[in-house]
Amino acid sequence: MKKFLERLEIDWHLFLPALVISLAGLVTMNSFSGDNYFFFRQSIWILVSVLVFLAASAGDWHFLRRTSVIMPVFLGMVLVLVALFAAGSVTRGTQSWFTLGSLAFQPSDPAKLVIILILAKYFSRRHIEIKNLRHIIVSSAYALLIFLLVFLQPDFGGAMVIFGLWLGMVVISGMSRKHLAVVATIGIVISAGLWLFVFQPYQKARIISFVNPMADVRGAGYNAYQSMVAVGSGRMFGKGIGQGSQSKLQYLPEYETDFIFAAFAEEWGFVGTGLLLAFCLVLLFRIVNNAEYAATNFETLFGLGVALLFSIHIAVNAGMNMGLLPVTGITFPFMSYGGSHLVTEWLALGILSSMRRRSAGPRV
């Protein structure tokens, strides 16, 4: 224990904003009357996640730089995702979970962290040559394998996050404008193909309801409409903690997961939502700042990848809650209910905190 405490050096600029965001979600789940199922379970997951963060902060993660470690981790993640099709539980038409009693695990959450690790490793040794099209193709092969396994579950939102991670890390690593234009063109062609031959009717309905939520308020556009009502009804200072009628009276479905941002906005208003996003920005700024002074290119790219992951989730979740983006089922980092994503996010912060102790730059 003494050695553990000596090695434990918490980056409070990472820990505190993430904890505040987690507690904001926890308070929003509390009904203050009746059943508090989500509140109590989320309390346990936050405790477990913080312990994971502390353990990861005390660890030494330099071994992740080795190909002999990264490749087995990547292949192991692929096997886990493949196993879902044989042993995964089907929930609302999606085979995305392993279920053991009352516990459920969603592999697509740690898969996003694995994608960041494999791309950080690949680009850390080839960032100078990134303008070579070969490296873009090879890196896309890693991401494509995970992308397809997640997409076929089918988890469209999770697959899009993985694509966004690959594209973002390629751009960060120095993709040329010409190659970026080629990727954009391919993306448009693939999107058209997905719409015509792959998307299920419910996925098309979500996109159509995004363009015009009022076209089917009682059907595909119901969630988006109720979410916008919840956000708007919060006004400047909100209705008060526990007073959100949209969420507590269950007009807003999945208020503890997909629409936690809307439920929070209804109770805390514009001011509270602004403070929440300010904590998110502090967290993201700290991650990017640490990446700037990282010991190696691998640590830099890993940090930027994690910042990119959180940014995508925050932007997409908040956007769909305000009717600016289609409803995709993407969680709000640290805030939405669920253990898989929460443990993964705190693990990522723990690794970043550990890496900071070996930073090559000044302590700020």
Image (cartoon, rainbow, N blue to C red):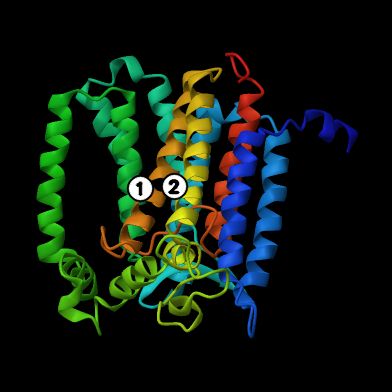
Determine which quarter of the picture holds residue 340: bottom right
Q: Which mark is residue 26?
A: none
Is residue 101 shown to the viewer in this render?
no
The residue that appears at 10% across and 56% down in the rendered structure is 192
The quadrant in which the N terminus is found is top right
Secondary structure of residue under mark 1: helix
Q: Is residue 150 left or right of residue 28?
A: left
The residue beneath circle 1 is: 162
Is residue 29 shown to the viewer in this render?
yes
Counting labels gives 2
Is disc 1 surrounded by few (<14), some (14 to 19) or many (20+) residues within 10 Å? many
Secondary structure of residue under mark 2: helix
Determine which quarter of the picture holds residue 108: bottom left
Determine which quarter of the picture holds residue 23: bottom right
The residue that appears at 30% across and 31% down in the rendered structure is 170
Is disc 2 surrounded by few (<14), some (14 to 19) or many (20+) residues within 10 Å? many
Residue 15, x across and y down, in percent:
64, 41
Q: Is residue 21 left or right of residue 214?
A: right
Asked whether the beta carbons under mark 1 and mark 2 sit within 8 Å of each other, the answer is yes
Kind of residue at disc 1: Ile
Residue sitting farthest toward the right: 2
Residue 284, x across and y down, in percent:
48, 37
Residue 273, x across and y down, in percent:
46, 55
From the viewer's side, name the closer residue of 46 and 93.
46
The quadrant in which the C terminus is found is top right
Image height of 199 relative to 144, above or below: below
Q: Which mark is residue 112?
A: 2
